[in-house]
Amino acid sequence: MVSATLHPGPQAPGPQGDQARRPPGTRAPRRGRTLTHRRKVEHFWSGLFLSPTLLIIGVFTVVPLLITVVISFTDWSVFRPLGDWEYVGLRNYESLLANTTRMQAIWNTIAYVVLSVVFTVPLAALVAMLLYFPKLRGAGVVRVALFATYVIPTIAVVIVWGNLYAPGYGPFSAAFTALGLPAPGWLSDPKLALVSVVVFNVWQMLGYYVILLTAGLTQIPEELYEAAKIDGAGILRQTWSVTIPLLRPTLLFVVLMTIVNSIQVFDPIYLLTRGGPANATNVLSYEIQRAAFEYNKAGDAAALSVSLLMIVVLVGAVVVIVTRRKK
């Protein structure tokens, strides 16, 4: 009888097998240590590639910001060398509340921001839905035309709107005259000047916000609308129950962009009204320019700039908090 010898099959290498094949005097590499080393290498190269961008941001953003904060506590003038100043403490900030012109600029800025948000965001959402849902031919051409108002240089747009608002021969005034009504002083009436500038801002920025909202609409699944139709929901019900809730992140972003752009408005004010009439359109950004270059008070202008920055940061923080809570 022939006896067969059974040989064991191949086994998975275990700790003992690895140790047997490892040369004497060597230790097994630790997996945690290898991952830590790999992460350190990745962080090193990431920091190395990002360093040029961080350097540019630091030189052209952080350093000027810190200098502006320092200047806000001094009496420096732009006609004196940088460093030729005296520290005045919080006097520049205290004068903000005591100066009626600057307080009016603050209230004008708030009114401008509120009117811009109230007019721009709902109108942009309506236009975006009208251009997206009906699937009409030429909708892309309309989007391009709307976006063109945003990319056209502001000075060119101001020339057009300056003629539109012109008393006597302007189309708006001529329309009122043709109807036998007295033509309003669009930019010369203190009660209408700020609203007229807001209308200009809405026309210029509408296309940009329409593009953003249209991009947000593309992220809503079509299946949700089909399910809503099966349940008998009409267009208004679909808009209220499906579109608006799912479009909320984009809407909040558009609101934030509108607020920030409105707070920082300068070009239309400078080119159309110069803050008039009777400071009716004087806003913080324009008052900063006047304080620095017309009144020769760079310290006051720096205090206004820091205050404007704090307002923008506060508004952004509020919008971020509201966004997180809604999620």
Image: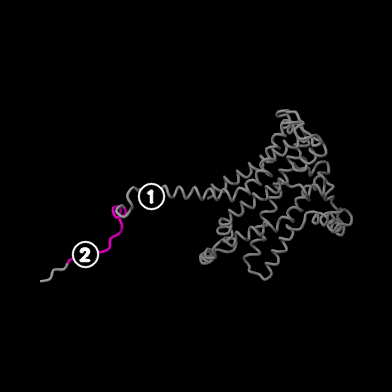
Count of picture labels = 2
**Residue 6 percent location from the top left of the image:** 19, 65
> Up-down: is 175 above or below 25?
below
**Magenta stretch, residue numbers:** 5-18
- Which residue lies at the image location 71% right of the left edge and 50% below the top edge? 116
- On whether residue 52 falls in the magenta region, the answer is no
Classify mark 1: helix, strand or loop. loop
**Residue 289 percent location from the top left of the image:** 78, 41
Q: Residue most toward the front? A: 24
Is 326 positioned to the left or the right of 203 in the image? left
In the figure, residue 171 lies in which quadrant?
bottom right
Which callout, 1 or 2, points at the residue further toward the start of the chain?
2
Report the front residue among 152 and 112: 152
Q: Residue most toward the right? A: 168
Q: Amino acid at mark 1?
A: Pro
Disc 2: CA contacts within 10 A as few (<14), some (14-19) or many (>=20):
few
**Residue 68 percent location from the top left of the image:** 71, 37
Q: Which residue is mark 1?
A: 29
Classify mark 2: helix, strand or loop. loop
Q: Amino acid at mark 2?
A: His
Q: Which residue is mark 2?
A: 7
Disc 1: CA contacts within 10 A as few (<14), some (14-19) or many (>=20):
few
* Colouring used for the render: one colour
- On whether residue 7 falls in the magenta region, the answer is yes
- Which residue lies at the image location 81% right of the left edge and 55% below the top edge? 161
Question: CB under 8 Å between callouts 1 and 2?
Answer: no
Is 281 positioned to the left or the right of 90 in the image? right
**Residue 53 percent location from the top left of the image:** 63, 49
What secondary structure predominates along the stretch shown in magenta?
loop
- Which residue lies at the image location 70% right of the left edge and 34% below the top edge? 70
